[in-house]
Image: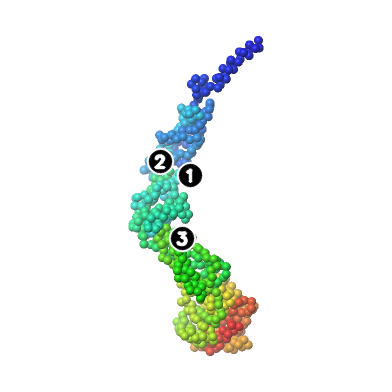
C-alpha cells in the first residue's frame, strides 16, 4: 500500500519541477513576466507653482524608485515635457527646464510655465512599466541681473588693450549663470560660467600659445580674450547674462576708448643685500657670504593695464683695477615675479650694472631701465675729510647766514680752499651740500659717499636745527665700519630727544654716548670754555657782529647728559639771565675707546656764530683729537 502512494507522488513532483524551471518569458510558460511599477517620491507637488530652482546652487531635485515583483529593475527612462527620453540607472536627478516668457507686467520674472516629468521603470527582461509615473507642475524663473562691473577703469575711460574686469551677479533663484562678452555688439567669447575676464595678446599681435597655459591665470577661473578683438578706437563693451534655465537678463554696457600708444613703466629697481636694503643710489658696504636680491616694481595702472612679466640682463662687474666688460648678458626669460625678484650669491666688491623691462598683458614692453649696484669696502687709510653742510640757506642777514656764508666760514677756520682742494694739515677735503645732494627728491648720503672718508664733519649753522633726515642709517653703518664723526649745529639734540624717533635716540645712545640733555630756549649762551688740559681753547666766545642786536646771546644751544666711556671737552656759559641748570654744563663731548671702532665728538652750539679765530682753534683741535 505504501509503495503505491510513492509511485503516485513521483509524477506530480516531476510535473512541479518542470513548471518551476520554465522560462517565464517563454510564451509557453505558465507564468508570464510582469511589468515593473514606477513611483516618483520627490518632486514639486502636482499642479504647484515653484521657483525655477528650488535652492541656491541646486536645480529641481527629483527622486523615484521602481519595483518588479518577479524580477529586478534595471533602470529608468526619463522624459521632460515632450523631449526625448533619457536612460539612467540612478534613482534621482537634478533637472533644469527651459525658461518661460518674460512677464512684461512684472520685470525680473517670467510667466509660469507648465512642465511634466515622466519616469518609466524597465526590468531585467526589458519590459517597461505601461503606466509610467508622472508629475505635472508650473515653474517661475527669475531673470538674473548683473549687479557689479569691477574694473580699474570708469565708463568713458581711455584704456590700453590689456584690460581686465570681473562681473558679479544676482538671481532670486540662483542656479548659476553664463556670461558672454561683446565688443560693439559682436561676441568675442562663448557663453561661459566664468566671471573674470582678461584681454591679452603678445608678439606681433598674434596670441602667444604658451600664454594660454600660463600659471599666472587659472583658466578655470579667468576667461582669456585675445587683444586682437579690442582694436584701437571707441567701443561699447557689452556683458550679456543668462541663467542655466535660459532666462536672459539686461545687457550691461560700458563705453571705452582703446589706445595702443600706452607703455608700462618700471617704477623702481632696488636691491637688498642680505636683510639690508641698499642705499638709494644702489650702494652698500661689503659683507661676505651675502645673497643680493633685486626687486623690480612696474606699473600700468594709468591706462588700466596690468603688469604681466619682467626680464633683466647683467653687464659684467667692474672690480677695482680690473677693466669692466662692456658687453651685456642675454636677456632672461620673461617671468612673473610679481613684483619681479632675482638673486645673486656672494657678489664681490665692485660695480654691477643691470637693465630691466616689464610688459603688460597686451604684450607692450616698457622702456629699458638701468640700475647700478655698488658694493664698497671701507678704506680709511687715507686722510680724507668730508664736510656735509646741512645749512638750509638762510636769508644772509645777520643771525641768518646763507649757505655761501657758512661755506666761507668753514673754509676760513679750517684753512682750506675748496676750489683748489688744498689740504688741511694733510687732510683731503670734500664738501657735500646736503640740500642738493638728493636721491628720489630726498637728501641722502650713501655708502658710496662715505666709504673712503676717514672723518665726517656734519654741520647745520643756520637758525633751525640739525635734522640728519634719512641719514641715521648710513651714519650708523659708517661708524660701525670704524669711521669718525664730528657733529656741530643749532638745536643739535632735538632729533635725538623727540619721543617718536627711536632710531635717533638709539643712535645718540650707541654712537654719541649721550642719553639726553638740557636745551637753552632763551638768548643766553655767550661762551664755551674748553678743557685746556686736553688742549682745547680756554674760551670760544660769541661774535656780536653775527647775531641780531635784539639777542642778548644765542638760543637753542645744548648741554649734555653723557653716558659712561665719554669725556667732557668743555662747558656751557651764558649771560647773567641764563638759567642755573645750564651754567657749567657739558657743551662738548667725546666718545671713543678700544671697545668700539667708531669715534665721535658732539659740539652743542653752531660754530658759525663764534669768533673766527677761537672757533678755528676749537675745530682744529677736535680734528686732531678725534685722530687719537
Q: Is residue 228 above or below residue 401?
A: above
**Mark 2 burial class by Cα count in 10 Å: few <14, some 14-19, many 20+:** many
Closer to viewer: mark 3 or mark 2: 3
In the foreground, 126 or 406: 126
Q: Who's the residue at 46% across and 72% down the image?
A: 441
User: Which residue is label 2 attached to?
Assistant: 99
Q: Is residue 348 above or below residue 431?
A: above
Taking the view exactly as shown, the residue that stands out farthest to the right is 2
Residue 198 appears at what percent x and percent y? 42, 54
In the foreground, 626 or 340: 340
Closer to viewer: mark 1 or mark 3: 3
Q: Who's the residue at 46% across and 80% down the image?
A: 393
User: Which residue is label 1 attached to?
Assistant: 57
Residue 275 appears at what percent x and percent y? 55, 66
Q: Quadrant of residue 619?
A: bottom right
Q: Who's the residue at 44% across and 37% down the image?
A: 49
Residue 302 visible from this viewpoint: no
Residue 396 visible from this viewpoint: yes
Which sits earlier in the primary sequence, circle 1 or circle 3? 1
Residue 284 appears at what percent x and percent y? 53, 71
> Residue 22 has which mark?
none
Where disc 3 sits, the SS reads loop
User: Which residue is label 3 attached to?
Assistant: 333
Q: CA distance from mark 2 to mark 1?
A: 17 Å
Is the Cβ of the residue at disc 3 closer than 8 Å to that at disc 2?
A: no
In the foreground, 204 or 198: 204
Which sits earlier in the primary sequence, circle 3 or circle 2? 2
Tally of numbered tags: 3
- Quarter holding the C terminus? bottom right
**Mark 3 burial class by Cα count in 10 Å: few <14, some 14-19, many 20+:** few
Which sits earlier in the primary sequence, circle 2 or circle 1? 1
Q: Quadrant of residue 110?
A: top left
Amino acid at each position: 500500500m505504501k509503495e503505491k502512494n510513492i509511485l503516485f507522488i513521483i509524477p506530480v513532483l516531476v510535473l512541479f519541477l518542470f513548471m518551476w524551471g520554465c522560462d517565464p518569458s517563454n510564451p509557453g510558460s505558465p507564468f508570464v513576466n510582469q511589468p515593473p511599477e514606477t513611483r516618483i517620491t520627490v518632486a514639486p507637488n502636482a499642479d504647484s507653482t515653484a521657483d525655477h530652482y528650488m535652492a541656491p546652487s541646486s536645480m529641481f531635485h527629483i527622486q523615484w524608485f521602481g519595483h518588479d515583483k518577479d524580477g529586478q529593475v534595471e533602470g529608468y527612462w526619463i522624459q521632460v515635457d515632450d523631449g526625448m527620453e533619457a536612460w539612467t540607472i540612478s534613482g534621482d536627478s537634478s533637472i533644469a527646464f527651459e525658461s518661460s516668457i518674460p512677464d512684461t507686467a512684472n520685470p525680473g520674472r517670467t510667466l509660469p510655465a507648465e512642465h511634466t516629468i515622466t519616469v518609466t521603470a524597465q526590468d531585467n527582461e526589458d519590459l517597461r512599466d505601461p503606466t509610467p509615473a508622472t508629475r505635472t507642475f508650473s515653474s517661475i524663473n527669475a531673470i538674473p541681473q548683473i549687479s557689479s562691473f569691477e574694473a580699474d577703469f570708469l565708463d568713458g575711460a581711455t584704456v590700453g588693450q590689456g584690460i581686465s574686469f570681473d562681473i558679479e551677479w544676482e538671481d532670486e533663484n540662483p542656479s548659476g549663470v553664463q556670461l558672454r562678452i561683446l565688443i560693439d555688439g559682436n561676441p568675442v567669447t562663448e557663453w561661459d560660467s566664468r566671471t573674470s575676464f582678461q584681454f591679452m595678446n603678445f608678439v606681433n599681435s598674434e596670441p602667444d600659445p604658451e600664454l594660454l597655459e600660463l600659471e599666472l591665470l587659472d583658466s578655470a577661473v579667468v576667461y582669456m580674450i585675445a587683444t586682437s578683438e579690442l582694436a584701437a578706437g571707441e567701443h561699447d563693451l557689452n556683458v550679456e547674462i543668462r541663467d542655466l534655465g535660459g532666462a536672459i537678463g539686461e545687457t550691461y554696457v560700458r563705453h571705452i576708448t582703446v589706445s595702443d600708444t600706452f607703455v608700462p613703466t618700471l617704477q623702481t629697481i632696488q636691491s637688498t643685500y642680505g636683510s639690508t636694503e641698499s642705499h638709494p643710489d644702489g650702494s652698500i658696504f661689503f659683507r661676505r657670504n651675502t645673497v643680493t636680491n633685486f626687486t623690480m616694481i612696474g606699473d600700468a595702472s594709468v591706462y588700466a593695464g596690468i603688469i604681466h612679466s619682467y626680464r633683466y640682463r647683467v653687464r659684467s662687474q667692474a672690480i677695482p683695477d680690473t677693466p669692466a666688460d662692456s658687453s651685456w648678458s642675454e636677456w632672461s626669460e620673461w617671468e612673473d615675479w610679481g613684483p619681479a625678484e632675482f638673486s645673486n650669491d656672494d657678489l664681490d666688491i665692485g660695480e654691477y650694472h643691470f637693465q630691466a623691462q616689464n610688459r603688460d598683458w597686451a604684450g607692450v614692453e616698457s622702456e629699458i631701465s638701468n640700475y647700478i649696484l655698488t658694493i664698497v669696502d671701507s678704506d680709511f687709510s687715507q686722510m680724507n675729510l668730508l664736510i656735509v653742510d646741512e645749512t638750509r640757506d638762510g636769508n644772509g642777514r645777520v643771525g641768518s647766514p646763507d649757505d655761501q656764508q657758512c661755506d666761507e666760514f668753514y673754509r676760513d677756520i679750517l684753512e682750506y680752499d675748496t676750489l683748489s682742494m688744498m689740504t688741511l694739515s694733510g687732510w683731503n677735503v670734500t664738501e657735500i651740500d646736503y640740500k642738493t645732494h638728493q636721491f628720489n627728491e630726498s637728501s641722502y648720503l650713501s655708502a658710496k659717499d662715505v666709504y673712503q672718508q676717514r672723518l665726517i664733519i656734519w654741520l647745520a649753522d643756520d637758525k633751525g636745527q640739525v635734522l640728519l633726515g634719512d641719514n641715521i642709517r648710513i651714519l650708523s653703518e659708517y661708524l660701525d665700519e670704524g669711521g669718525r664723526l664730528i657733529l656741530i649745529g643749532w638745536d643739535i639734540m632735538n632729533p635725538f630727544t623727540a619721543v617718536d624717533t627711536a632710531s635717533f635716540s638709539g643712535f645718540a645712545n650707541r654712537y654719541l654716548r649721550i642719553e639726553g640733555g638740557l636745551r637753552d630756549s632763551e638768548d643766553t649762551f655767550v661762551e664755551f670754555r674748553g678743557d685746556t688740559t686736553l688742549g682745547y681753547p680756554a674760551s670760544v666766545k660769541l661774535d656780536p657782529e653775527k647775531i641780531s642786536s635784539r639777542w642778548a646771546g644765542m638760543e637753542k644751544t645744548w648741554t649734555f647728559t653723557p653716558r659712561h666711556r665719554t669725556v667732557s671737552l668743555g662747558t656751557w656759559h651764558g649771560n647773567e639771565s641764563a638759567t642755573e641748570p645750564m651754567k657749567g654744563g657739558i657743551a662738548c663731548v667725546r666718545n671713543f675707546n678700544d671697545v668700539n671702532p667708531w669715534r665721535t665728538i658732539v659740539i652743542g652750539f653752531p660754530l658759525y656764530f663764534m669768533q673766527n679765530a677761537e672757533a678755528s682753534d676749537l675745530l682744529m683741535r677736535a680734528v686732531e683729537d678725534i685722530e687719537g
